[in-house]
Amino acid sequence: MEVSLEAINKSFGSVRVLKDVSLHFPSRKFVTLLGPSGCGKTTLLRMIAGLETVDSGLIRFGDKVVNQLAPRDRNIAMVFQSYALYPQMSVRQNLAYGLRVRGTPKAARAEAVERVARILEIENLLERRPAQLSGGQRQRVALGRAMVRKPDIFLMDEPLSNLDARLRITMRAELRRFHLDLGATTVYVTHDQLEAMTMSDHVAVMNSGMVQQFGTPAEVYGRPANLFVAGFIGSPPMNLMPGRIEAENGVPVFANEQSRVPLRHLTQRLQVGQHVVLGARPQDLHLASSTDEASAHGRVWVVELVGSEKLVDIDLGGKRRIAVQVRADAHVREDDPVHVRIDPAQVHVFDASTERRVFEAA
Ligand SMILES: Nc1ncnc2c1ncn2[C@@H]1O[C@H](COP(=O)(O)OP(=O)(O)OP(=O)(O)O)[C@@H](O)[C@H]1O
Ligand SMILES: [Mg+2]
């Protein structure tokens, strides 16, 4: 089932929480709404579920406008951000409840419950009551209640937020697999960009009630459309350096007090004097052994070991810092003088006033 949102607006009192949101969720795809706290993700999800009215705009399932359709008539399953289990029922009864009220036969109910309990690693908790569970176990039961159904549309609001690091990673894969098997259109909400990037077919990056970019994980990571997306997607975060465009032998050069980077591939797109922000991911930067091939120079401020890599924070002077990711076995120590090589093919350029990406010629 395809889901379309067309020019959705919503205010609570005088606060506009959704501003002209238009999104298209293709049938059977896993789409994530990603953005910081308060940007309107839950509100949008509740509108798709029919639990929240829209001030203006249309919501369609397939060709059908569903603005007036009651939640129970939408054939959706939803996992809420703040979930409540039935306290007097066992985990097994909680999981089966939705099927029981819909008149699903007992044997089919039992089978569905066993299946999701296995996926969610809660088989040994089926006879307990919610009060006897940890927060993460309760969250998995809440997830399971929605997973026993066979909806057209599956809506999930931060369903992994209370799980420990290991479970989060296994559940990411389980949910992705579950989605492929179920074949429902899934709309998933999270503020965790790693979750969004690993699970989704498409990601809608939101900020302040507006969609900033809609694309595949590779697109929003590889070609962020504006400064917000550039700073939000990617870990460790992208380095963002303000500067101006100068010309050198007819080639535009990014320049500020700490660095110079020629931008030959953007000759047609940049103007001398233009204020821009240069973005470079720590993974795309390198420490150089000699000064000639370097674009910036500084002193190592802090070195952090992160598993198989080191994150080197470099002080460029003038209160500017830049993070470079190197292999864990690289010899680099705090206070060492270093040179940073910035590969022009690996940078992202944004106009400083519009904050939009300066796109390469196709
Ligand atoms: N019933 C309500 N009445 C008034 N304001 C509300 C109501 N529900 C949400 N808001 C406000 O609308 C904005 C969007 O809220 P929403 O819950 O959609 O954010 P979110 O993106 O889900 O955030 P989080 O990641 O923290 O869950 C917030 O500023 C919130 O305070
Ligand atoms: Mg929310």
Image (cartoon, rainbow, N blue to C red):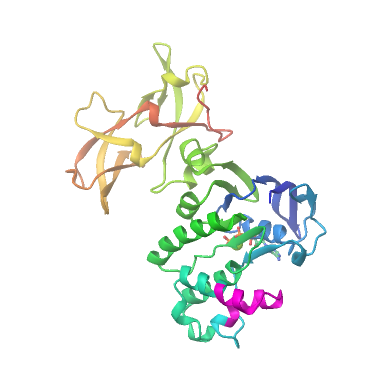
Q: Residue at x 70, y 61 (%)?
A: 49
- Up-down relation of residue 107 to residue 357 (above or below): below
The residue sitting at the left extreme is 331
Q: Residue furthest right?
A: 68
Left of 67 or right of it: where is 354? Answer: left
Q: What residue lies at 27% left-to-right and 37% top-to-bottom?
A: 298
- Please state which of residues 279 and 271 is positioned toward the viewer in this rendering: 279
Residue 292, quarter of picture: top left
Asked whether 361 or 358 is in front, the reply is 361
Q: Nearer the viewer, residue 194 or 1?
A: 1
Q: Considering depth in this image, is 316 or 88 the residue closer to the camera?
A: 88
The residue positioned 41% from the left and 31% from the top of the image is: 347
Q: Residue furthest top?
A: 249
Report x, y in % for residue 274. 51, 24
- Outermost residue on the bottom side: it is 88
Tell me where the magenta segment starts and ends, as one range. 93-111
Q: Position of residue 324 (x, y in %)?
A: 31, 41
Q: Residue at x 18, y 46 (%)?
A: 329
Residue 354 higher or lower than 206, as above or below? above
Q: Does the magenta portion include 110?
A: yes
Q: Main secondary structure of the magenta part?
A: helix
Residue 91: x and y, percent?
54, 81
